[in-house]
Image (tube, helix red, strand yellow):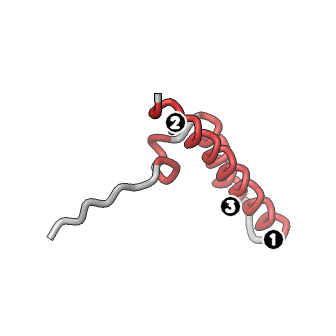
Amino acid sequence: MKENITWPRRNRIDLLTPAEKAIYDAVQEVEKAGADVRLTESVILLSKARDLVADYVDEQLAKDNAK
């Protein structure tokens, strides 16, 4: 049985905006740097930033689709 799963736009790398992709790439680079509490905190903050950008983008897309 096939399930019809729709992934949120923000979870698909191919649909990220340039700003979201830049933050995603920054997280990947920080992850490569090693293990340290400060690096973990950096990843958490970058992830929060990406979520905020994605919230904005999704809101704008919803407004555009409502027109």
Quarter placement of the N terminus = bottom left
Read off the residue under disc 1.
Answer: 36
3 w.r.t. 22: above or below: below
Give how far apart the Cα atoms at labels 3 and 2 are: 30 Å
Image point 35% across, 55% down: which residue? Answer: 6
The mark tally for this picture is 3
User: Residue 61 bears which disc, if any?
Assistant: 2
Question: Which badge, 1 or 3, is on the more N-terminal residue?
Answer: 3
User: Outermost residue toward the left?
Assistant: 1
Closer to viewer: mark 3 or mark 2: 2
Q: Earlier in the sequence, mark 2 or mark 1?
A: 1
Disc 3 target residue: 31
In the current view of this chain or complex, which residue is farthest to the front? Answer: 67
Residue 59 picture location, percent across and down: 58, 41
Query: Disc 2 versus disc 1: distance between alpha carbons?
Result: 37 Å
Residue drawn at 62 percent across, 49 percent down: 24
Residue at image location 45% in from the left, 33% down from the top: 65
- Assign a secondary structure to mark 2: helix
Label 1 secondary element: loop
Viewer-proximal residue among 67 and 42 = 67
Q: Nearer the viewer, residue 42 or 63?
A: 63
Kind of residue at disc 3: Glu
**Horizontal side, residue 6 vs residue 54: left or right:** left
Q: Amino acid at mark 2?
A: Leu
User: Please, which residue is most extreme toward the right here?
Assistant: 38
Q: Position of residue 37 (x, y in %)?
A: 83, 72
Task: Kindly indicate the quadrant of the structure image that contains residue 58.
Answer: top right
Q: Nearer the viewer, residue 24 or 65?
A: 65
- Callout 1, which amino acid? Asp
Residue 47: image location, x then y, percent? 68, 57
Which residue is depicted at the point 58% across and 35% down? 60
**Residue 33 image-quadrant placement:** bottom right
